Amino acid sequence: MARFRRAYGAAPWHLLLLAGCFAVTGWIALRLAGGASAGRMLLWFLGAVIAHDLVLFPVYASLDRVLRGALGRGGVPSPLNHVRVPALGAGLLFLVYLPGILGLGDGTYLAATGLEPRVLLGRWLAVSGVLFGVSALLYAARRLAHRRRPSRPAG
Amino acid sequence: MPASPPPPDDAPSAAPAALWAGLARHRPPGVDAVDRAWRSPVRGPWLTSVFGAVLLATLPLVIVTGLLDWIAYGPRLGQALPRDVGWLHPPVFDWPTRPAWLFRVTQGLHVTLGIMLVPVVLGKLWSVVPKLFDWPPARSAAQLLERLSLLLLVGGILFQTATGLLNIQYAYLFGFDFYTAHWYGAWIFTAALVVHVVIKLPRMVTALRGPGFARTPLERTRPEPADPDGLVARRPGPATMSRRGVLALVGGGALLLAALTVGQSVDALRRTALLLPRGRRIGDGPTGFPVNRSAAAAGVTPEQTGPGWRLTLRAGDRTVALDRARLLALAQHTAVLPVACVEGWSTTQTWTGVRLRDLADLVGPVDPTTARVRSLERAGLFREAVLHGGQVTDPDALLALRVNGVDLSLDHGYPARIIVPALPGVHCTKWVAEIAFDG
Ligand code: HEM
């Protein structure tokens, strides 16, 4: 037992559990392999991880770094989160409703709904504008409240 | 400085020790810079565990409602998609007709909850992302395998979310069969999730039992003591958001998505689904509710549905043909029923027509076991659907001729369509040409 642990790095049940997981995946891979679209599925599966870990995350983390550089020390109270929060909200909506916002999907949308696809870019911009607007108003209110109580310690 | 140093997790390197030690020594350029770049002081076991707990409570609902969708298609009648799934499937049963809102709720939940979890998943991934760039990538065979399973876990949830989101917005960019991909993706994800939960549950419970940070304001937000998993930044910067702020941000994102999605399933709120296809009515008036698959797309023409149209009823070798006037002369029944699409949207309307069991009576079988419904459509996956006995004999199971007091419109299935309580919309066949009863 102790020898197994030393060689493997964890208890036997750990290996059993993982073997079960890989067995399911392997069985599915064998089932799908050779099918006309198996390669595409694999591409989308791995592509999704790469798109998140090596594209989406670095992009938003870098943007945030730039933002922190620009606003981190600006003003009391800090405006940083009043930009971050609506930006993240707008980004989230874009990510989730992207096909509608960009009007992707040509014939299938019309066939399914009987309606011409509408590019919803304007709506997304409007909702995003509202998010930024509300955030700016809140910031203005906080600043005002802060000025009225000048004796409070900065935070 | 943390009071007690973290247990050095690279000390008891497992065999082949030389291999793992060598890997640890050969640090590729850049890993140290990346390691120093993690600054957020709120990353740590507590925040990750809160996200984990939320996902642990909600993901099973998404998984189960997804599997129910597959069952609702009727695997026993050979109608579930994908059809041939081997041994890998949940126990199957005949999908009930009651409560009538059953499918509306299960599938609405599947899609709406799936969408709401996007920010939670992103938050969870953000909280653990330093681990991805950790060096060495593994210190034992056990860790290596576990990391491989994490690829399945993360790939699984992202794949399911991406295919689901594209499907409900009719953008089939992926170019493979959605059913096959989403079905097998679900199993890969579920298996990896079970592994992850079993391995991490004790850690999560410990972290949540410890001192909480739900009330800590920004001024008092400090990093947690260094943890064995290395989630806590080694060189944390000053806090710019408290942990409760991060949670409010993620929760707010989920609520924002909910607010822009529920309109798909609630008629009174239809137009609030601002950015989704099902936030639109197709017109004013009693037949202006959303359509799935237009007559034009189905290739159904006004000539086929004109005065020459007949409904053929069959049972054994008995056949009866009825035109629309004769159908309207039969006993009419009105039912207020939701029609719920597999894509998660739904709408409640008032349908009027002939009970399916009355139609069965016209050709014979007292207790029909199945009814095979054929549409005028020539092609397409859903030009034919089989109903089981319970679905044929439900008192509200209708061949609808009218809706909301007017004739069906062509896009809603004129001259006649099936409406059965809790039956997925794709099986509520439109432009019905023939019903063959077995019994
Ligand atoms: C953890 C994530 C998810 C899991 C495990 C999961 C699982 C499932 C399963 C097992 C099915 C039945 C598939 C079949 O009948 O072949 C299903 C159907 C479906 N899922 Fe998901 N799902 C997930 C996330 C999502 C998300 C985020 C969305 C969309 C926003 C979504 C949209 C759909 C749709 C539209 C269907 C119905 C497809 C149809 O029958 O036409 N899913 N899901």
Image (cartoon, coloured by chain):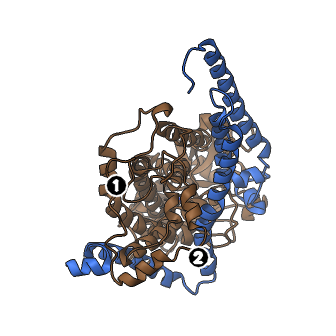
Chain colours: A blue, B brown
Q: Are marks 1 and 2 in contact (CB under 8 Å)?
A: no
> Is label 1 on the same chain as label 2?
no
> Which amino acid lies under the numbered mark 2 shown in the image of this protein?
Leu
Residue at image coords 53%, 40%: B239
Pinpoint residue B292: horizontal percent, then vertical percent. 66, 54
Pinpoint residue A63: horizontal percent, then vertical percent. 69, 50
Pinpoint residue B209: horizontal percent, then vertical percent. 29, 44
Q: What chain does badge 2 belong to?
A: A
Q: Is residue B229 above or below residue B20?
A: above
Is label 2 within 8 A of ligand 1 (CB to nearest ligand atom)? Answer: no
Question: Outermost residue, top direction?
Answer: A148
Q: What chain does badge 1 belong to?
A: B
**Residue B428 is at least partly visible in this image:** no
**Residue B311 is at least partly visible in this image:** yes
**Residue B254 figure quarter:** top right
Residue at image coords 64%, 76%: A40
The circle drawn on residue A36 is none
**Secondary structure found at label 1:** loop
Disc 2: CA contacts within 10 A as few (<14), some (14-19) or many (>=20):
some
**Residue B227 figure quarter:** bottom left
The residue identified by callout 2 is: A42
The circle drawn on residue B5 is 1
Residue at image coords 49%, 71%: B184
